[in-house]
Amino acid sequence: MLVQYKTFRRLISPEKLLKLEEKFRRREALVVLFGGHILGVRTQIFLVAGVARMSVTKFLRVDAATAFLTVALYWGDRSFG
């Protein structure tokens, strides 16, 4: 566990880390859905989902929705005229 390392404990207390984990678990699908569109955060969001043991099937469904949304926004903005 990360909080066992002294350096990590200086950054965040175990209590605060537990609160953050609880918040992530309540809104994990939304975090992955919208976090996938933020430049520089996508990889970290996916790592957190893995560390928090998000269900693989749920993750894949949410990531597919994210990809669909990205493609729809990208191609919906183009004119084919």
Image (cartoon, rainbow, N blue to C red):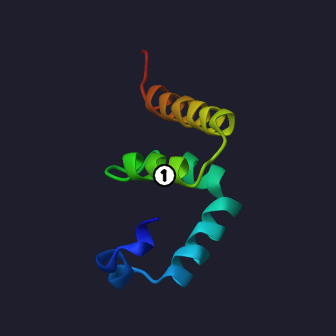
Furthest residue toward top: 81
The residue where tag 1 is placed is 35
- In the foreground, 9 or 25: 9
Q: Is residue 13 above or below residue 26?
A: below
Residue at left offset 38%, top offset 46%: 43
Which quadrant of the structure image shows residue 58?
Answer: top right
Residue 63 x/y as whole percent = 56, 36
Residue 18 x/y as whole percent = 59, 75
Residue 34 appears in the rendering: no
Which quadrant of the structure image shows residue 15?
Answer: bottom right
Which quadrant of the structure image shows residue 81?
Answer: top left
Residue at left offset 42%, top offset 67%: 2
Q: Is residue 69 above or below residue 39?
A: above
Residue 59 x/y as whole percent = 61, 39
Q: Is residue 71 left or right of residue 54?
A: left
- Residue type at the position of mark 1: Gly
Q: Is residue 15 above or below residue 78?
A: below
Residue at left offset 54%, top offset 50%: 49
- In the foreground, 53 or 39: 53
- In the foreground, 73 or 37: 37
